[in-house]
Image (cartoon, rainbow, N blue to C red):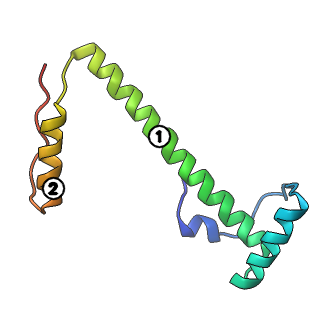
Amino acid sequence: MTTGASARSASPSGSPTPVKLDPQLKVRLKRLAEVRNRAPHWLMREAIAQYVDREEKRQSMREDAIKAWEEYEATGLHVTADEADAWLAKLEAGEEVDPPSAHS
């Protein structure tokens, strides 16, 4: 998966993809483009790239959660919320600590 500014700034190599915008949105886009000193096309590409990046991350998180749930159902291994909170508090305080061990 290619993400980040370098992927968004690469020159377009594909064919144009038409996007129909309602007139009010077109006006808003043009106004924002002028204020940002960018082309409306650039803003649309940036918005789409950010949306796709965000949704890919969301999908990946969902898949990870499903895998974790399936593993829990298969093994019964887990950590309690209190154990996880205590570990996260130590990390937040700057301590380098291993995560708690899973148990049944």
Q: Is residue 24 left or right of residue 62?
A: right
Return the x and y of residue 73 as percentages of the image width and height: 29, 15
Q: Is residue 25 left or right of residue 63?
A: right
Residue mark closest to the camera, 2 vs 1: 2
For residue 102, which numbered disc appears in the image?
Answer: none
Q: Residue at x 69, y 82 (%)?
A: 36
Return the x and y of residue 98 as percentages of the image width and height: 10, 46
| Residue 10 vs residue 40, the one in the foreground | 40
Tell me if mark 1 has few (under 14), some (14-19) or many (20+) residues whose alpha carbon lies within 10 angstroms of its own: few
Return the x and y of residue 41 as percentages of the image width and height: 79, 70
Q: Is residue 27 above or below residue 87?
A: below
Which quarter of the rendered picture does the C terminus lie within? top left
In the picture of the structure, the residue carrying the numbered disc 1 is: 60
Residue furthest top as drawn: 74
* Total numbered badges shown on the rendered structure: 2
Circle 2/circle 1 CB separation < 8 Å: no
For badge 1, the amino acid type reads Ser
Tell me if mark 2 has few (under 14), some (14-19) or many (20+) residues whose alpha carbon lies within 10 angstroms of its own: some
Secondary structure state at the residue bearing disc 2: helix
- Mark nearer the N terminus (2 vs 1): 1
Q: Residue at x 17, y 40 (%)?
A: 84
Q: Residue at x 22, y 16 (%)?
A: 75
| Residue 76 vs residue 10, the one in the foreground | 76
Label 2 to label 1, Cα distance in Å? 24 Å
Q: Is residue 17 left or right of residue 65?
A: right
For badge 2, the amino acid type reads Leu
Q: Residue at x 14, y 52 (%)?
A: 89
Secondary structure state at the residue bearing disc 1: helix
Residue furthest right as drawn: 23
For residue 91, which numbered disc appears in the image?
Answer: 2
Q: Is residue 10 above or below residue 34?
A: above
Q: Is residue 59 above or below residue 73?
A: below
